[in-house]
Image (cartoon, coloured by chain):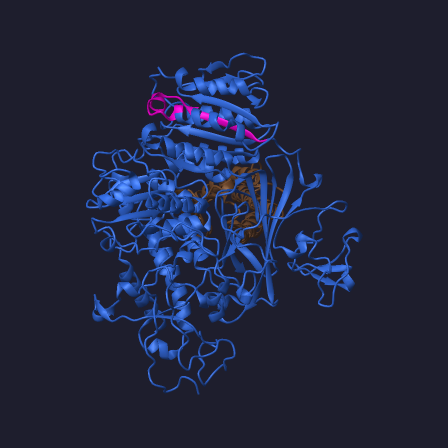
Amino acid sequence: PPGSGGPPPPPGMVGGPPVASGAAIGAPRPGGYAGAAMPLAGVGGQPELDQPVADRYLELPFNTQGPGGKGSGLDPALAPRPSPDEARVLPRPDAYPDGAIAPDQASPRFLRMTVNAFPNTTATATKSGLPFGAVLQPLAPPRWPGDEEVPVVGFAGSGVVRCRRCRTYINPFAQWLDGGRRWKCNLCYLINECPTEYFGPIDEYGRRRDRDERPELCCGTVEFVASADYMVRPPQPPVYVFLVDVSYHAVSTGMVATVAQTVRGVLDELPGDVRTQVGILAYDSAVHFFNLGASLSQPQLITVPDITDVFLPLPDDMLVNLHESRALVDLLLERLPAMFAQTQTLDAALGPALKASFQLMQHVGGKLQIFSTTLPNVGEAKLRNREDGRRGGQPAGGGAASGGKAGPPQNNLLLPEEGFYKKLAVECSRQQICVDVWLCGAAYSDAITLGQLAKHTGGTLYHFPGFSAPRDGAALARDLKHNLLREQGWEAVMRVRCSQGVKITSFHGHFFVRGTDLLALPNVDADKAFTITFGLEENALTSTNVAVQAALLYTTSTGERRIRVQTVSLPVIAAVADLFKHADVDACTTVFAKLAAERALAGKLQDARDLVQARTAEALQGFRLVCPTEAKRTGHMLMPESLRLLPLYALGLVKHLAFKPDGDVRADERAAALMHLDSSSVHSVVAAAHPRLFPLLLKLSPPLGQPAENGLTVLPPLLPLAADRTLANPQGAFLLEDGRQLLLWIGRACPPAFLMDVFARQSLDDVDPFSVELAPPSHSEAAATVHAVVEALRSERPGALQPLRVIRQGAPEELLVLRAMVEDRSVSMMSYDEFLVHCHRTVCSKVG
Amino acid sequence: PEPGTMAFPAAFWFWLLIFLVGAGLVFFLVVHLITLSDLESDYINPVDATERLNRFLMPEYIAHTAITFIFLITLNFVPFLANSALVAWHVKRYLDREHLLDATSIYPSLAERKKQNLAKLGFYTLMFFYYMYRMVYALVANRYARKAK
């Protein structure tokens, strides 16, 4: 019988050195067990578990000095780290049934499951400890070679073919019966009649012969053109309204000038057509409107000083057609900074200004951008400085912001205060207004309360603490341009359906839940992601496959109503070991991050950290349960191949700005980080949890920076995020990328030859780090390679990573780089190897 | 019977009042449950539903707390003790600010709320029948007592 009484096997190979070749993984053990065909009890099986045993796993030996003496520590060099492809968050083909990403399943760039299979019972689900959920990014842009455009299908005649009962759209996994005259819905199992116009013969396998000509029958991601039945009103034109703070701080820091200049520059490229509308309002202690009627020769300023009862001074002409009033809008944006240059007022009446903007837009909807520097302090809905007298957001008498219990709501800086903003957000959502909030103040801006406007309307919260135009102007301009120009859908709703027996237990992201499983999204853009978690309705699933379908009904910027449908069909399996084979570590990390962000936004920060660590331990525990007894006896840590990076990413999340327990993290920064995690895509969250660190002091020449055969650019090898192995070297130069910023760290003793090649200077001592630029690519081969690498990174993160910031060793901004060193031990958190030991101990105490 | 006395005893009027309040509480709760089930089947949108539910919530809490207090001062300890547990729960929810519904978070908590409200409905109905019993007893027992005299 296999495995009983053989010699103890040699320790398996573990995650190799962190160089580009990728980690070597433990091979199947000698005399190893096959996966599925296991006898239930007795020989070689696990009688108490009734499950087949895992055949491949990673073993981490504990044989160095650790806290419990020799044999309780882990050699840091052996800990698993991502290979460059894994760090790029490319989906692993092994995780999918059949070992490849099938074209009739929805592309993983739109719909990424945490586990590409379903457990057959709730017991199996709990035993595995895995999260079952999905991350949806319906308008995800193509980022890699091989990412295709979504096929568009028009249904003339009968309209889109849908199931009679559950309204599922026709998809590649529907079964065709009766020679093609009827089809069986794969979600509710109802047999539907096929409309005569849609009829087509089926082949001997029961598939439609014309499936290759019909994208909806062979592609998992497809877009339908929606008929008039899908519209409650004619498709709306794109509407852009800018509400700008023009108080003293806004003007003196240069925010007004930066915003006006940026908007002026993109007026011609705004997504839309001849119907695009634009409106501009300003506020300080009063609300300022601008008459942009096409018949005027210059824009007219109308100030409404009475903020207790704001009304629109003109019935129209404040929200104008961009093409008709183009010259006026241009003139206004040019003059806006000068108009308010002499202002001395420190008041900001945001509440009344918001009500005015709402009145302006409520008949049509659209995007409202709010630029604010001062905490609203006059008029309705003013906010008070809750952070006053508290260091870093903790109340004087003990950490409610970082403690476990929520505490009374007024004391907890992570809970919103004024109900006005949430109510207004719900009203905006009903009128299809999406609000983006840009906070550029130096003092406390109560981001968590103002962020409610963005959270419930599907918008974004941007935070530029202490904005000052020379330093942050380029970053603000880049973000604003990206926000306005990226692909977006207007007046959208999204519904997710799943097969009978499976239900959706929660939604996470920026939206308003308008009905059961129905999300209202006044504006959905290319970067927004929505997370869902699944549960079983009854205890056991009887079918062999479970399908999940997500449908987004939206209006394009050119006024067409479309329905983007993503469908996946997953096998139902009973073996926990197979569930682990199909797990996707990036999606699992993202789901943990969003669950934790939701907990933190409810005021419970400690609970959020505990959730991440507890769920990681549960997953590892679930795997250990199905490992062979021999392996368990060695006392080594056993990890599944698919989830070997989970502890590293979990540690990165727990140390992230959003969750770390330091009192030095200001409430606004934390709120902005939490909201970013809550609405970001898989690759953004993984980059936030584990930024990429590249060495630059190697031979900077091709093939670095050039595309390899798979089409991806060759990047320098990844380094572990440990300061003592990287940043401790004063001669080093490193590039750090965390999904939003690109930082170039230069050591004190960096060779002047390198500086000459890359910056065209001998030394960086006397140079302002914000204005240092790379030498042009023609200057030297090294400079060309660095440019190529930076461009490759920028193409992976649309709209981010600009500008490149240079940070010298010892400068105060070095904190930005040190913060990313996830593997190091910090003030209150473990280092990576200690965390692995901790996980292992937790798992062993429960499993043995 | 002596001339000038009321045909109905004072206790009856007291219990009649309590009975009516009890009926009102049951009514509030039935409205609540119907609204939640309308929400689930998409007959009403969450903003309108939360407005309707929040309108009835504070009156329910206040009416219930009032009659519990009245039980205490009129020394009816059995109904007082039975209702005080629910009063304590209401107070806890009020202090935690969880009592009012919020349009943005109503869907996730829908199943939980339905269960809680069904339990409360069962309790209110039980107490309603108890009040009705006490009211009829107050009405009838005096007649028997007078007859016995």
Query: Does A428 sit left or right of A642 as displayed?
Result: right
Give, as a single range, the part of the protein colored magenta: A238-257
**A459 part of magenta stretch:** no
- Residue positioned most to the top: A297
Of the pair A523 and A34, the residue shown nearer to us: A34
Name the image quarter holding the C terminus of chain A: bottom left
Q: Is residue A736 left or right of residue A427?
A: left
Decide if residue A387 is in sight here. Answer: yes
Query: If the image is split into quadrants, where does the N terminus of chain A sit?
Result: bottom left
- Residue A22 located left or right of residue B123: left
Vertical side of A593 occupied by A423: above or below: above
The image shows residue A736, relative to residue A238, as above or below, that is below
Q: Relative to the observer, which residue lies in front, B29 or A116?
A: A116
Q: Colour of chain A?
A: blue
Give the residue drawn at x 29%, y 71%.
Answer: A61
**Residue drawn at (39%, 56%) of the image:** A84
Give the camera-side residue of A455 and A12: A12
**Residue A254 forms part of the magenta stretch:** yes
**Where in the figure is residue A472, as x and y percent of width and height?**
34, 32
Percent x, y of residue A790: 38, 44
Q: How many marks?
A: 0
In the picture, one chain is brown; tell me its letter: B
A3 on left or right of A322: left
Residue A676 in the image, given as x and y percentages of width and height: 41, 43
Residue B7 shows in this picture: no
Residue at 49% x, 32% y is: A424
Q: In x, y percent, where is residue B46? A: 56, 41
Name the outermost residue toward the right.
A196
